Image (cartoon, rainbow, N blue to C red):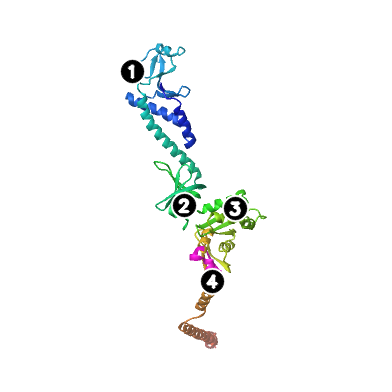
Amino acid sequence: MIKIGTALFEACEELERERGISKDILISSLCDAMVAAYKKHMRVKDAANIEAILDESSGEIGVFSTKTVVESVEEGEEDTQISIGEAKEIDEDVEVGDEVKIEVTPEQFGRIAAQSAKQVITQRIREAERNLVLNEFLEKKGTLTTGIIQRVENRNVIVNIGKTDAIMPQKEQIPGEYYKPGNRIRVFVLNVKETTRLPQVIVSHAHAEIVRELFELEVPEIEDGIVEIKSISREAGYRTKIAVWSNDPEVDSVGACIGPRGSRIQTIVSELKNEKIDIVRYSEDPVEYIVNALSPARVVSVDILADDEYSHEAMVVVPDDQLSLAIGREGQNVRLAHKLTGWKIDIKSVSQMEKAEAANFQNYEEQPEEDYEDDVQNDELQEEIEEEMNQQALDEEDLPQNEDTTEDEASEE
């Protein structure tokens, strides 16, 4: 047996506290390292009956070979069998068929075992850390977490979120936001990629689900299921539209999200660095839903152009002074309304619709002069044909009907 003392166990307990790696994993790694070192030292590849045993009470570790007790050892089975006589010297109570453990720790084995143990334990610690991080953040995928900004590298923001550093790519950052190292930040765990080292965690500060999580934290009715978030569309740093619906007729979904004197929505806006938020009342009626989604613009009418499994299109008419508001800066308002409702929305002002309708009416009412003359000539020709046919019918009625009968009667006389 090799004396290792209590320092090893203290180190294992410290690793368990600091990194969350189980003490049992470290001890089993040490035992596996001892077995690997023994095989290398003895130059044997297959030794299934060899194991390392660690005695925590005495602080000693050794390599043991498990052998089966037999009457007489068969030739070539010396490594796996032991005679009953030899076994009795180790344990007087053994019988044929029992198994006994015999220590086979080589002399001067401590240095060799230490080198091998160092490599194996280091590898096992890395594997254990990787698995811990992977399992932890696979569970956190799709949720919000809080981290501390570490640094900015190649336009990527490195955020420490506990046991690992996560990467926030540029496309997942809020435009114009300054990410100062040391500041706390709430991020959305977007993806977890498994690598040969620690898993790579991708986080986002611009994801729409951040708004959902903030509303669930600030609005008790949403957490209780009374108010339901139907859809969210967001352009991070600028504007967000969120559609809400109340399952209780006595609870106003929009009012619940705004809170008393706007306290709830103000907290969320502050968390999002004064990003504008439009709370939209959801409706099963697409016309009403589209009208609500285009707020704060006023809508005159909504015409459904297509509503099937392939497309959803609508024509929206707004007052002339509301056209720019309905479209929004660089089309932002109508674009967010489209993402929120899932409908393709075409917006026109009242004057634009009147001009379009007048142009269509003129196209239907006005005909070219040549077409008009052709129609007149066709009408006159048709009248002449009808008169001629009527005259022929009258002439046929004036002809004698019984000429043949009169001639026969005259010849008989």
Query: What's the amino acid at mark 1?
Result: Gly
Q: Tag 4 or tag 3, which sits nearer the N-term?
A: 3
Kindly identify which numbered label has been placed on residue 76. Answer: 1
Which is closer to the viewer, label 2 or label 4? 2
Q: Relative to residue 308, is residue 163 depicted above or below?
A: above
Please say if the residues under marks 2 and 4 sit with CB atoms less than 8 Å apart. no
Kindly identify which numbered label has been placed on residue 349. Answer: 4
The crowding category of the residue bearing disc 4, from other C-alpha atoms within 10 Å (few below 14, some 14 to 19, many at least 20), is: some
Residue 338 x %, y %: 52, 61
Alpha-carbon span between mark 2 and mark 1: 71 Å
Which is closer to the viewer, label 1 or label 4? 4
Q: Nearer the viewer, residue 9 or 299?
A: 9
Alpha-carbon span between mark 1 and mark 4: 99 Å
Quadrant where the N terminus is found in the figure: top left
In which quadrant of the rendered view does residue 100 lie?
Answer: top left
Secondary element at image label 2? loop
Q: Tag 1 or tag 2, which sits nearer the N-term?
A: 1
Kindly identify which numbered label has been placed on residue 135. Answer: none
Q: Residue furthest right?
A: 250
Q: Tag 3 or tag 2, which sits nearer the N-term?
A: 2
Residue 30 x %, y %: 41, 29
Secondary element at image label 1? loop
Q: Relative to residue 344, is residue 133 depicted above or below?
A: above
